[in-house]
Image (cartoon, rainbow, N blue to C red):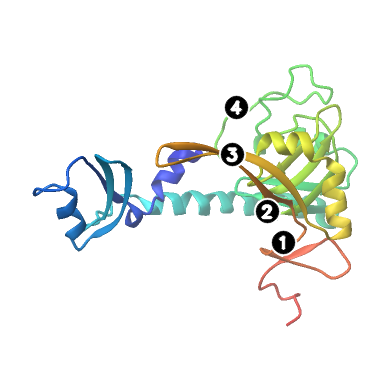
């Protein structure tokens, strides 16, 4: 299931509105009658003979399966927690550390002799179908697109450095590949051209915010504008987790180790 379908399952139908395009003032269905109704919200005038009137809905039909979206998130968490607590922790114990996680992914820092040899021993747990057929680790290509299995997104390439500032804002270096840089809310071309891996490091070490200018196209009343804006591109302040003093480690809010 892609993100577009997932979003539709959790859509808030209370936010739906009725918009009517009208070309006359008088009459039962004219602009004057619509504005006089109790559910009138606002209007936008396009020209002398064209106006858009937004009306609040008088009835709301709850026809979205919001429990589907909720279950997708919960089942994803169950799969991740099972993989981490029942497989990775018993296997590597204190040599394994989660440095970043998202809805369906985990980034680990692991200290061991050969993690790929361990993957070969536990191949039923992994989808290795995207590895090269002649990969240097001799990992067999198995379990293509099997639900609930984890896969190595780097396909054997070694991740050498990682910086995670906050949710949806991180960068990583992969041996032999271009740096991966993520900063939600900042245009992709701005991140690619004006932000470097060292910027992420400086932001983390010096505890500073970095801004970048970006342009976007906006339409208002069918008049198209180009707007230049300054946004906070990188920020070390993670409001979703508690940063432990004198370290880069974090704990979720409510954790027993966080001092009151």
Report, in whole angstroms, how far the alpha carbon at label 2 lies from the one at label 3: 23 Å
Find the residue positioned furthest to the left: 28
Circles 2, 1 touching at the beta carbon (< 8 Å): yes
Report, in whole angstroms, how far the alpha carbon at label 4 lies from the one at label 2: 29 Å
Q: Position of residue 228 (x, y in %)?
A: 64, 43
Q: Would you place residue 81 above or below residue 244 in this image?
A: above
Please tell me how crowded label 3 is: few (under 14), some (14-19), or many (20+) other residues with Cα within 10 Å.
Answer: few
Residue under label 2, please give it.
167
Q: In terms of sequence position, does the residue under pointer 2 or pointer 3 come before the other?
A: 2
Residue in the picture at 78% in, 43% down? 171
* Residue 144: numbered disc: 4
Report, in whole angstroms, how far the alpha carbon at label 1 lies from the one at label 3: 26 Å
Please tell me how crowded label 1 is: few (under 14), some (14-19), or many (20+) other residues with Cα within 10 Å.
Answer: some
Q: Is residue 90 visible?
A: no
Residue under label 3, please give it.
216
Residue in the picture at 24% in, 39% down? 49
Find the residue positioned furthest to the top: 134
In this view, the mark in front (4 or 3)? 3
In this view, the mark in front (2 or 3)? 3
Q: Position of residue 210 (x, y in %)?
A: 78, 52
């Amino acid at each position: 299931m892609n993100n577009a379908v997932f979003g539709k399952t959790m859509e808030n139908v209370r936010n739906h509105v009725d918009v009517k395009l009208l070309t006359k003032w008088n009459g039962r269905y004219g602009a004057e009658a619509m504005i006089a109704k109790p559910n009138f919200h606002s209007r936008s005038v396009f020209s002398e003979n064209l106006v858009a009137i937004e009306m609040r809905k008088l009835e709301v039909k709850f026809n979205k399966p919001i429990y589907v979206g909720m279950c997708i998130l919960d089942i994803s968490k169950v799969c991740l927690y099972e993989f981490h607590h029942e497989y990775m922790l018993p296997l590597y114990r204190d040599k394994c550390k989660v440095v970043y996680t998202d809805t369906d992914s985990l980034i680990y820092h692991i200290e061991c002799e050969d993690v790929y040899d361990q993957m070969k021993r536990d191949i039923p747990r992994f989808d290795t179908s995207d590895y090269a057929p002649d990969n240097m680790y001799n990992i067999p290509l198995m379990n293509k697109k099997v639900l609930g299995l984890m896969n190595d997104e780097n396909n054997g390439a070694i991740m050498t450095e990682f910086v995670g500032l906050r949710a949806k804002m991180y960068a990583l270096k992969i041996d032999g590949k271009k740096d991966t840089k993520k900063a939600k809310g900042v245009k992709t071309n701005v991140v690619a051209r004006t932000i470097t891996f060292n910027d992420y490091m400086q932001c983390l070490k010096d505890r500073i915010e970095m801004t970048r200018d970006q342009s976007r196209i906006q339409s208002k009343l069918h008049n198209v504008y180009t707007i230049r804006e300054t946004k906070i591109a990188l920020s070390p302040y993670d409001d979703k987790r508690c940063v432990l003093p004198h370290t880069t480690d974090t704990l979720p809010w409510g954790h027993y180790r966080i001092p009151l």
